[in-house]
Amino acid sequence: MEYKVRFANPAKQYADHREEFIKAFDDTLSRGAIVNKEELWKFEEDFAKFVGVKYGIGVNSGTSALDVALQAAGIGQGDEVITVAHTFIASISSIYLAGATPVLVDVGQDFNMDTRLLEKAITPKTKAIMPVHLNGRLCDMEVIMDIAKRKGLIVIEDAAQSLGASMKMADGAAQSAGSFGVAGCFSLYWAKALGGFGGSGMITTNDPAIAEKARLMRYNGENREDRHFYYHAHNFLMDNLQAALLQVKFKYFPQWLQRRKEIAELYHQGLGGVAQVQVPHFGDPRFSDIYTNYVIRAERRDELAKFLQEQGVETMISWGTPTYKEPVFVQGGMPRLVSAGGDVHPPAGGLPETEKICREVLSFPMYPELTLEQVQYVIEQVKGFYAQ
């Protein structure tokens, strides 16, 4: 159907910067700079500087970033990694693929890891915590890093949706997503706040050993200087052309983040008084959210989504089914679930907040090219639905 307000609009962004994209494309390909060249190195350097770390390692997706980071950090057979159930399946699958066992804790009102459950989830087998910074909001990294330090655990951040998000620490300094743990893993999928033309990703770290291992592991384990292979690994390298095109977008990224915050505030003002809707503004001044997604919790969510579609507003439900109820888990390999009451037995009982969120979440259009008129149209339709 023809939407009045698209959920995402990459064509508009391309049109706005078309000449710059074409120039980057032509400059890169006319030099034959296809793989592992200056465009990638420069983008990695600028990305690391933006996050506030020493190293950036470009890969072909956010999933690959998680795969490489976990293995580079030494996560493997017999280890447990604590993460959340309310996340894209890749967060959990990457733990399985590293040979480790995921332990899933419930989330809080802000969709992120309920840090009160962390110590309940730790066992002698626990080796790492993987916080997932969802929708452009950080987990409470002050608490997570304190627990990790006390318990001797590794922290690997799933920062796929949080590039540019930050939080103010106890010393007053702001720290960015991807700069807390031994590694941060970002998705640069086309629909993200900074998205390529297809799939790309980035690993960030301050650890030179992890940076070096990740560089080799993204390229079949090969050191391109001495031409020897040091690991059994996959080809996860970011294409040089993707890096060149992402670098064009990266120039505009700070102003795009500001525009996202402006749009979020418009939604907040317009929907804050609708009793049947909870908007994602949580009132904690420590956090600077970037609203990769604008996700509400709504009564009669499915009816609202259907109504908005009929009115020409494209929305998305992420996710309507708890991950642990997906066939891949139901058929075998069910992870351990930890709620406020401790381990969930049987697992089919689920995690209360995760279950509730899956029934209520709805993502609204959120991208810098949205106009005031389009945002107001979405708001009016939501109000109209609940006024019926």
Image (tube, helix red, strand yellow):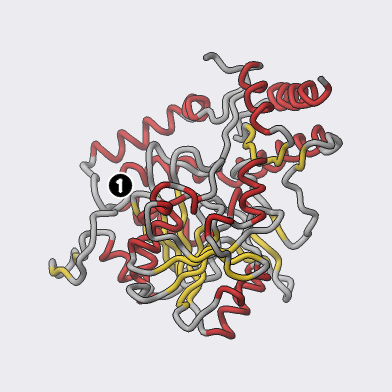
Closer to the camera in the image, 322 or 379: 322
Residue identifier under label 1: 240
Closer to the camera in the image, 119 or 229: 119
Residue found at x 56% / y 79%: 148
Residue 42 image offset from top left, x and y in percent: 39, 54
Quadrant in the picture for residue 278: top right
Count of marks placed on residues: 1
Residue found at x 67% / y 68%: 341
Residue found at x 66% / y 16%: 311
Amino acid tagged 1: Asn
Quarter holding the C terminus is top right
Closer to the camera in the image, 52 or 3: 3
Closer to the camera in the image, 19 or 286: 286
Residue found at x 56% / y 64%: 345
Residue 96 image offset from top left, x and y in percent: 37, 62
Viewed as shown, does residue 64 lie left or right of 303? left
Residue 259 image offset from top left, x and y in percent: 67, 39
Quadrant in the picture for residue 138: bottom right
Viewed as shown, does residue 181 lie left or right of 366? left
Looking at the image, which residue sits at the far left? 227
Q: Please, what secondary structure does the residue beneath circle 1 have?
A: helix
Residue 362 image offset from top left, x and y in percent: 64, 37
**In the rendered image, the vertical position of residue 102 relative to residue 330, given as above or below:** below
